Image (spheres, rainbow, N blue to C red):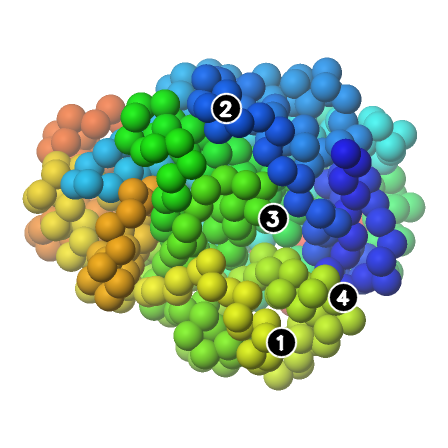
């Protein structure tokens, strides 16, 4: 079955998967969505016998139907290799009666590696397929993890350049150090004086900027995105939900076909949307529990049907979820609007003009798969301490938000179904928040001292990604205001 893609704000024009990946965002400002969600081709029993790579092929080949088997297998092989520190790629760890799906075993120790280790290969393959000979320039806004993972993926990939914008004062010290020490002739990192939403909005604006596009095209560049607005990010993320289910089934933790819940610490709504697509493929998922931090715009949306970003932006200990404009929600809105691009565009225009929109009761009824919850900073820290005390397992603050919301969910619903929590980062990426949750005395130590302390306390091996930054020189120090981002791009690319 051929799957094509169309824009959530378009006129129905369709694109192949490779065209959608290459473009990133549709020219009308919408996001590409598959015209239908394919069903899983093999039984869950058969799938549970497969390696991560073979399972990735099963899932991704159903969506990326214009890639040949050889092309796709080549991409998968180059992505899910020894960059990951375990052959399982995404191990499932049972602690305190819940299953943590550890998505942080890749090169930059956050879940972004799951998709960003394959996106560069999908993109360069897509360029070849479409006889695109311009150099691909990736413009990416990051709340801390995407930037490093995207650069690690694209570094020294021929035919590509990548420019990452991050909020100078909105990422963890280790996240920043990871980014500003990035090697690779084709990588560029720029701090901005605003927050993540400012960076993301300015990047989206550059995609719409016809003058900039024409200028860059003349200079031989094709601009694309590595943010989760790119469908090439979303499809690889479906794989690990299928893998988690298959692993539970293989290990006899669930009966064949038994439904499970998933809890996802959410920012841009990409990770949880992948779970939703998995459910539509036929994966037996029950509730999709959307966990927010103090920036609880999604919790409010699920409780009221009103999306309202007019509120203070709060810097939390889970910075990768400090987001008020969850881009991927647009794909869900399009779906519950009955695939009506006109209506979807109207709501998104209202979001950019008034900062909010409301959905109809009929649309709300279709959100039953989701449960929205949030955890405060205090609850997040308490959860890190409690889980450590009860089980010895150390959660990073993002995963702790999910674990805290799951506890609230259980207390509220009494639901005891088998549950998987998406564990999105290694605690080594957020040592200060993690250790201070255990004992405030740690606040006086430096970040790298805290790394050693976490190692001493837990015996968990220190990831290569952390060892590397201890001595790495700072290679990027540019900082600009959000409105000067286009000028920075012109400067970096030598278009003046
Ligand atoms: C990006 C990120 C998230 C949020 O994922 P979304 O797909 O943006 O919802 C959560 N945790 C960590 C560690 C992340 O890097």
Q: In this view, does 23 lie above or below 469?
A: below
Q: How far apart are marks 4 and 3 (CA)?
A: 21 Å
The reply to whether the C-beta atoms of the residues labelled 2 and 4 are less than 8 Å apart is no
- Nearest to the observer: residue 86 or residue 13: 13
Label 3 SS? loop
Label 1 SS? helix
Determine crowd level at label 1: few under 14, some 14-19, many 20+ residues with C-alpha closer than 10 A.
some
Which residue position is annotated with label 2? 47
Q: For the residues carrying marks 1 and 4, which lies nearer the camera in this image?
A: 4
Label annotation for residue 227: 3
Which residue position is annotated with label 1? 351
Q: How far apart are marks 3 and 2 (CA)?
A: 29 Å
Q: Residue at x 60, y 48 (%)?
A: 227
4 or 3: tag closer to the N-terminus: 3
Q: For the residues carrying marks 2 and 4, which lies nearer the camera in this image?
A: 2
Label annotation for residue 341: 4
The reply to whether the C-beta atoms of the residues labelled 1 and 4 are less than 8 Å apart is no
Q: How far apart are marks 1 and 2 (CA)?
A: 41 Å
Percent across and percent down for residue 129 are 84, 28
- Nearest to the observer: residue 317 or residue 67: 67
Q: In this view, does 358 lie above or below 329?
A: below
Instruction: Locate the N terminus by quadrant.
Output: top right
Q: For the residues carrying marks 3 and 2, which lies nearer the camera in this image?
A: 2
3 or 1: tag closer to the N-terminus: 3
């Amino acid at each position: 079955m051929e799957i094509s893609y169309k824009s959530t704000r378009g006129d129905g024009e369709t694109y192949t998967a490779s065209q959608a990946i290459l473009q990133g965002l549709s020219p009308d400002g919408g996001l590409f969505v598959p015209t239908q969600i394919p069903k899983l081709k093999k039984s869950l029993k058969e799938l549970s016998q497969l390696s991560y790579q073979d399972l990735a092929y099963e899932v991704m080949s159903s969506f990326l139907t214009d890639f040949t088997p050889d092309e796709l297998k080549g991409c998968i092989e180059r992505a899910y290799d020894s960059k990951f520190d375990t052959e399982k790629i995404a191990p499932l760890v049972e602690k305190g009666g819940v299953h943590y799906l550890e998505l942080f075993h890749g090169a930059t120790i956050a879940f972004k590696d799951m998709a960003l280790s394959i996106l560069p290969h999908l993109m360069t393959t897509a360029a070849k397929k479409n006889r695109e000979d311009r150099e691909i320039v990736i413009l990416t806004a990051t709340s801390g993890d995407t930037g490093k993972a995207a650069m690690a993926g694209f570094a020294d990939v021929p035919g590509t350049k990548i420019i990452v914008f991050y909020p100078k004062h909105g990422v963890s010290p280790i996240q920043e150090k990871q980014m500003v020490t990035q090697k690779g002739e084709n990588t560029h990192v720029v701090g901005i004086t605003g927050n993540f939403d400012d960076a993301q909005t300015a990047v989206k604006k550059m995609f719409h900027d016809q003058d900039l596009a024409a200028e860059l095209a003349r200079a031989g560049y094709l601009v694309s995105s590595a943010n989760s607005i790119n469908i090439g990010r979303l499809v690889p993320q479906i794989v690990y939900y299928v893998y988690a289910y298959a692993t539970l089934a293989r290990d006899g933790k669930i009966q064949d076909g038994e439904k499970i819940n998933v809890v996802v610490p959410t920012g841009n709504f990409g990770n949880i949307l992948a779970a939703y697509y998995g459910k539509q493929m036929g994966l037996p998922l029950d509730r999709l529990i959307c966990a927010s931090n103090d920036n609880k715009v999604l919790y409010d949306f699920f409780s009221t049907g009103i999306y309202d970003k007019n509120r203070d932006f709060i810097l939390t200990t889970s910075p990768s979820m400090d987001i008020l404009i969850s881009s991927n929600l647009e794909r869900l809105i399009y779906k519950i609007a009955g695939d009506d691009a006109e209506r979807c565009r109207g709501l998104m225009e209202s979001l950019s003009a008034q900062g909010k929109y409301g959905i109809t009761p009929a649309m709300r009824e279709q959100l039953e798969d989701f449960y929205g919850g949030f955890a405060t900073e205090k609850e997040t820290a308490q959860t890190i301490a409690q889980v450590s005390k009860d089980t010895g397992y150390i959660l990073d603050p993002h995963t702790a938000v999910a674990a805290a919301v799951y506890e609230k969910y259980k207390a509220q619903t009494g639901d005891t179904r088998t549950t998987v929590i998406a564990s999105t980062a290694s605690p080594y990426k957020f040592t200060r928040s993690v250790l201070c949750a255990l004992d405030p005395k740690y606040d006086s130590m430096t970040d790298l001292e805290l790394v050693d302390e976490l190692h001493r306390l837990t015996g968990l091996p220190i990831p290569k990604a952390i060892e590397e930054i201890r001595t790495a020189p700072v290679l990027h120090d540019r900082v600009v205001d959000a409105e000067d981002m286009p000028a920075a791009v012109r400067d970096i690319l030598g278009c003046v």
